[in-house]
Amino acid sequence: MLISDKIEAEFNRQIGNELGNSHQYYAIAAYFEKEALFGLAKIYTKQADEEREHAMKFVKFLLDAGATPKFPAVAAPRNDFSSAVDAAQVAYDSEVRTTEQIYALVDLALAEKNHIASNFLQWFVSEQLEEVASADTRLNVIRRAGPSVLMVEAYLAHQ
Ligand SMILES: [Fe+2]
Ligand SMILES: [Fe+2]
């Protein structure tokens, strides 16, 4: 096995975190779908799919490293949102939290001088920059639209 038991355990935990993010994005997408904001629903569904891919990257890495993927329980997402801003804020917060989780994993890999794990995690470090930036942009656009969230749909149609 190319990684320690500790890294194996933490990576397995991150599988649950990424799947939790996926659940959260599907819940947000469902909220927008219910609000008939289909452009936003589509964006968050795509995000949800991407989070599943993130989880599967950890699964593949564990297998490649000779470790054992163990899928943990996935936390229930928030299903009730008071507004579009609220939903976009939940998404933004979850990306900030994920960035902290990835940093902690990098810290662990570096502490153990495990360059295979640390190199694998660099993809996630770059990804988080994009994820936080796009979540921030979406939150700002939705916030600026205020009560006329429909404007956001028109904005998205021109992107
Ligand atoms: Fe992710
Ligand atoms: Fe993400």
Image: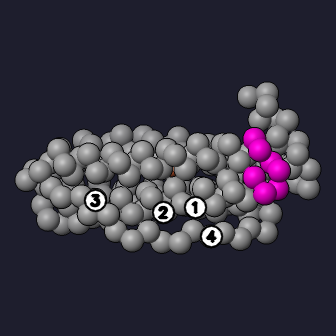
What's the CA distance linking mark 1 and mark 2?
6 Å
Q: Which residues are magenta?
A: 33-39
Mark 4 and mark 1 residues within 8 Å of each other at the beta carbon: yes
Instruction: Identify the secondary structure beneath mark 2.
Output: helix
What's the CA distance linking mark 2 and mark 4?
10 Å
Residue 69 coordinates in the image, percent (x, y): 24, 58
- The foreground one among 51 and 136 is 51
Q: Is residue 97 left or right of residue 60?
A: right
- The foreground one among 104 and 84 is 84
Which of the two marks, 4 or 3, is nearer to us in this view? 4
Q: Is residue 135 left or right of residue 9?
A: right
Q: Which residue is mark 3?
A: 11
Disc 4 residue lies near ligand 2 with CB under 8 A? no
Q: Which residue is mark 1?
A: 24
Identify the mark at residue 78; answer none if there is no mark: 4
- Label 2 packing within 10 angstroms: few (<14), some (14-19), many (20+): many
Instruction: Identify the secondary structure beneath mark 4.
Output: loop
- The foreground one among 8 and 75 is 75
